[in-house]
């Protein structure tokens, strides 16, 4: 068996190492492609794969085993006798193949550990900044990468955001900084000690709320996994002053000597924090005279110009600012960079406005914590909600926002838990269900129902508080279909901003 601790560099001898890769999505393919380039012998095991990736894997010299039965370990895999198994993020700890590898004492790595070991392909290797959290991590990752780029550094937003870290590691021109968004799944497979442990320049856990409890088993286990982001941080552990869990995770983290804890929040900041004073975003953490002075970073009025003025967006700005300040970005570069930032699609995106009603796509609100931030931004809402709840109870969210709800439109294949939460905690709020066997009909129905009850001054908000894969490809597909349905309906409703292209529908009976 190969000594895997010796494989700590792109320039180590990976030749002939037998590796099984679990999954052939974008992450799994990047792992297989990288290892084959290094000379390893690679077998990929996947429940399914696109024709394009199957063909590409064959071209580059990998072998694919399709696991038709997830409860059975393929005989071809056991015969391969892998020396290492690399796990794609979606594979839970109780998956049959994971348990098999553990019982056979085969080392298990995630793609992040592999990328960290290989980070020196281009010299000097990029610094890493790590971002996680239940909500806001994609926007914060994009913000940090944008601010670094605006300051003249070569930066890339990678990881759970959609671009595999290994693709960035292998980019021939290299980067100065990689801003790595990490899901709880990726963090689960990251070691905190040893050769494969990441040593980031800075790290942040934005918040921790109930999510993926079906995968992790409990909130405590989920929170502990999120805390891995802080392990071995060298310069700054950034945490949320409004979230005691993130503070506790920083306090419990084993970091490098000299690393500082930096808080971010919407109130007046302390000497080691970034925050807001009289509508001005300020940095007291990285000022030599921080006990008496602060750097101005931006203002709420300026953030409003680029769609970042809502409370949760401003919090993301402060977190990203703290991360890049830890990397040496000047306050004036933070200021100028913020003015040129563009918010990602499907994150609090206004898709249309007609008849006095604003239609907002926040399909990326895939859990109650994210949906809470969206709902808080508006005073009168027709809420489109539902999907895969991932073991999370919506009752606290319903209770918190019942006063602002004009009506509710429930989507998703399994709507019972959502409906039950409203029946218990908001029985007087009109509730409609979208019953559609065809995915193409879900959003047109939802939009028609919402349009029938929305009034002048209302916001129709798609903030599902749930994952999308029961009826849609992903949250982006869900949001795109919503926007298309809104624009189609707006044409029939006489929207000045859209050419006539559709017809107005009728309402179903509320339940």
Image (cartoon, grey):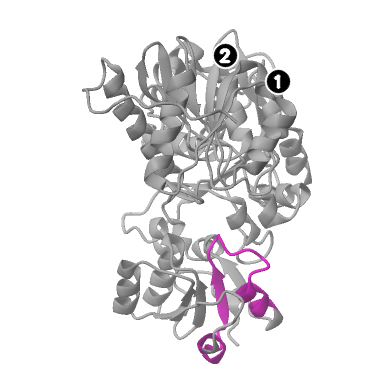
Q: Position of residue 396 (x, y in %)?
A: 72, 31
Q: Position of residue 466 (x, y in %)?
A: 57, 42
Whether residue 470 is visible = yes
Give me the residue at 61% from left, 17% from top. 404
Secondary structure category for the residue under label 1? loop
Place residue 342 in its image quadrant: top left
Name the residue furthest front. 509
Residue 265 vs residue 217, the one in the foreground: 217
Name the image quarter holding the N terminus: bottom right
Residue 379, numbered label: 2
Q: Is residue 468 inside the magenta stretch?
A: no
184 relative position to 65: left or right: right
Q: Rate crowding at label 2 as few (under 14), some (14 to 19) or many (20 or more) other CA atoms within 10 Å.
A: some
* Residue bearing the label numbered 1: 270
In this rendering, the answer to whether 82 lies above or below 363 is: below
Extent of the magenta region: 76-102
Q: Position of residue 463 (x, y in %)?
A: 53, 32
In this rendering, the answer to whether 63 lies above or below 297 is: below
- The first of marks 2 and 1 along the sequence is 1
Secondary structure category for the residue under label 2? loop
Q: Position of residue 16 (x, y in %)?
A: 45, 86
Name the image quarter holding the C terminus: top right
Place residue 358 in its image quadrant: top left
67 relative position to 197: left or right: left
Give me the residue at 55% from left, 60% from top. 89
Residue 214 vs residue 411, the one in the foreground: 411
């Amino acid at each position: 068996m190969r000594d895997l601790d010796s494989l700590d560099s792109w320039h180590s001898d990976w030749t002939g190492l037998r590796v099984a890769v679990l999954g052939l999505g974008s992450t799994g393919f990047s792992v297989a492609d990288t290892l084959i380039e290094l000379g390893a012998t690679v077998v990929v095991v996947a429940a399914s794969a696109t024709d394009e990736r199957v063909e590409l894997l064959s071209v580059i010299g990998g072998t694919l085993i399709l696991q038709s039965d997830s409860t059975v370990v393929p005989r071809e895999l056991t015969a391969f006798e892998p020396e290492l198994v690399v796990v794609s993020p979606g594979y839970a700890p109780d998956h049959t193949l994971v348990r098999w590898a553990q019982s056979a004492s085969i080392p298990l790595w995630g793609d992040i550990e592999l990328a960290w070991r290989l980070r020196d392909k281009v010299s000097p290797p990029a610094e890493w900044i790590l971002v996680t959290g239940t909500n806001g991590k994609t926007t914060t990752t994009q913000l940090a990468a944008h601010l670094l780029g605006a300051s003249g550094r070569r930066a890339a937003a990678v990881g759970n955001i959609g671009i595999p870290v290994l693709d960035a590691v292998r980019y021939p021109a290299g980067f100065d900084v990689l801003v790595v968004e990490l899901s709880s799944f990726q963090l689960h497979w990251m070691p905190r000690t040893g050769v494969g442990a990441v040593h980031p320049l800075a790290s942040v856990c934005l918040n921790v709320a109930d999510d993926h409890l079906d995968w992790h088993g409990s909130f405590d286990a989920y929170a502990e996994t999120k805390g891995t982001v802080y392990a071995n941080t060298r310069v700054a552990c950034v945490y949320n002053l409004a979230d005691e869990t993130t503070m506790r995770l920083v306090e419990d983290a084993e970091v490098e000597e000299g690393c500082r804890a930096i808080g971010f929040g919407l109130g007046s900041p302390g000497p080691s924090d970034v925050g807001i004073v009289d509508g001005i975003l300020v940095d007291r953490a990285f000022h030599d005279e921080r006990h008496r002075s602060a750097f101005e970073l931006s203002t709420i009025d300026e953030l409003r110009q680029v769609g970042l003025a809502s409370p949760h967006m401003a919090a993301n700005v402060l977190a990203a600012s703290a991360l890049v300040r830890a990397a040496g970005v000047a306050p004036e570069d933070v200021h100028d960079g913020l003015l040129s930032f563009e918010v990602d699609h499907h994150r609090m995106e206004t898709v249309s406005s007609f008849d006095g009603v604003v239609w907002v796509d926040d399909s990326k609100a895939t859990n109650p914590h994210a949906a809470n931030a969206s709902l808080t931004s508006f005073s009168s809402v027709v809420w489109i909600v539902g999907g895969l709840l991932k073991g999370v109870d919506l009752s606290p969210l319903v209770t918190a926002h019942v006063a602002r709800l004009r009506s509710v439109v429930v989507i998703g294949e399994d709507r019972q838990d959502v409906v039950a939460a409203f029946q218990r905690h908001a029985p007087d709020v009109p509730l409609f269900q979208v019953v559609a066997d065809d995915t193409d009909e879900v959003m047109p129905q939802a939009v028609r129902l919402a349009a029938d009850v929305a009034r002048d001054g209302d916001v129709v908000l798609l903030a599902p508080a749930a994952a999308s894969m029961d009826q849609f490809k992903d949250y982006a597909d869900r949001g795109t279909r919503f926007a298309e349905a809104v624009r189609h309906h707006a044409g029939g409703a006489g929207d000045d901003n859209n050419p006539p292209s559709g017809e107005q529908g009728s309402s179903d009976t509320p339940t």
